[in-house]
Image (cartoon, rainbow, N blue to C red):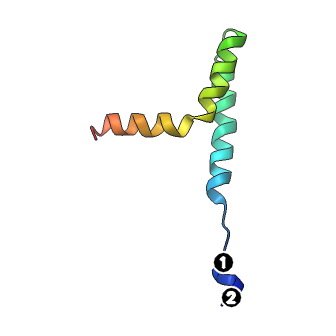
Amino acid sequence: MGDKANCNCHTGNAVYGLGLIGAAIYFISQATSFIMGVLGFVKALFWPAFLVYEAFSYFAV
């Protein structure tokens, strides 16, 4: 077994990275000023938190 049992699969990082890029493109393209663009990039960094918050609100958890 040895090395095969220690699989370092980083697919979650790839999904987060693609989500970050997509969210950054979306939020920055919607920005009407430089400050809103910066805020859009910050939102893109924390998109999973927004997603979980909205899901919990929707399901009334």
Q: Find residue 26 and report its image quarter.
A: top right
Q: Determine contact: label 1, label 2, CB under 8 Å.
A: yes
- The residue indicated by pointer 1 is 6
Identity of the residue drawn at 44% across and 40% down: 52
- x and y percent of residue 23 in the render? 63, 33
The vertical placement of 19 against 41, above or below, is: below
For mark 2, give the secondary structure. helix
Image side of residue 53 versus residue 7, left or right: left
The vertical placement of 6 against 12, above or below, is: below
Amino acid type assigned to the residue bearing label 2 in the image: Gly
Identity of the residue drawn at 69% across and 29% down: 25
The vertical placement of 39 against 21, above or below, is: above
- The residue indicated by pointer 2 is 2
User: Given the current orientation, which residue lies at the most extreme bottom position?
Assistant: 1
- x and y percent of residue 20 in the render? 66, 38
Amino acid type assigned to the residue bearing label 1 in the image: Asn
Identity of the residue drawn at 63% across and 50% down: 15
Label 1 to label 2, Cα distance in Å?
Answer: 7 Å
